[in-house]
Image (spheres, rainbow, N blue to C red):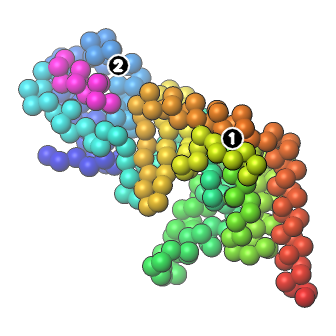
Amino acid sequence: MAIEDNPESRRKYGEELKRRRESAGLTQERLSELTIISRTHLAHMEAGRRRPDVGDARRLDQVLNTGDDFFERFLPMLDGKKVAEHFEEALEFEGQATAIRVYAPTLVPGVLQTRAYAEEVLTSGPEPKSGDECDRLLVTRLERARILEDFDSPMFWVILDEAVLRRNIGGPAVMCEQLRHIVSLAERRRIRVHVLPFSVGAHTLLEGFVSLMWFEDQPPIAYVEGLNSGRVWESPDMVRACQLDYDHALGDALSHCESLALIRSVAKEYEHASQQHEHP
């Protein structure tokens, strides 16, 4: 049986874990004690919401005496997952998070995008998309913003590279609307914003997009993204390393108030450029 790393395969993995645990006559609590895996984490694994790391899998194989090293051999992609193949999983994590901290190097994060900005981003690829396909992508992108409808959950922090403000996506009018949308969310105290100005030069998050997520009853994760790829990291050491890099970059960023002042100023520049375009 081959298991790919996606929500459906995690569900099957969890079902097999539960079947073998029950066949061994063990409760979740007893298996937790024998494998040194928290009972909560074990329950999430059986429900298909989380997966063990390689150490957990080896202990499960040993305690459950699998004989075929099932849990290690079929542990999918130990070092991460491709977002293109498992976008639903990324959405699932995002929807469960109680706190999210994002660094965006070039684009406004999807959760904060306006319709016009998102449309421009989603249609910018080399391969043409049908109207229906574009509509589906746009709906998915805009649906993500629903996590911000509650006042305080998840707690959302974002570090924007200054390049995000300066890159003209869709024209001055689109950029003006987008930046003012971010300011509006911040003024309503729904998000906290920090800008990393060009003057900082090199910083710890230069290599790409990072999203750190915390949960009420699950270990935190880190999601990193590059060109046509992305990875979800669950290893505690890797998550801590990403958190340290984020905190270091945050120390170099402008304060929340200074960041909002800069974003308002750049939005004003786009507004003037838009008016000049309409009335040359």
Residue 157: which disc? Answer: 1
Rendered residue at 48%/55% (across/down):
226
Q: In this view, does 173 lie above or below 3?
A: below
**Residue 61 belongs to the span the image colors magenta:** yes
Read off the residue under disc 2.
Answer: 37
In terms of image quadrants, where is residue 189? top right
Q: Is residue 48 visible?
A: no
Towards the viewer: 233 or 214: 233
- What secondary structure is found at the residue carrying circle 2? loop
Percent x, y of residue 266: 84, 61
Local crowd size for mark 1, using a 10 Å CA cut-off: few (<14), some (14–19), many (≥20) = some
**The residue under label 1 is which amino acid type?**
Trp
Percent x, y of residue 29: 33, 14
In terms of image quadrants, where is residue 275? bottom right
Rendered residue at 86%/85% (across/down):
278
Rendered residue at 88%/50% (across/down):
261
Magenta stretch in the rendered image: 52-63
Q: Is residue 172 above or below residue 9?
A: below
Percent x, y of residue 260: 84, 49
Percent x, y of residue 3: 22, 46
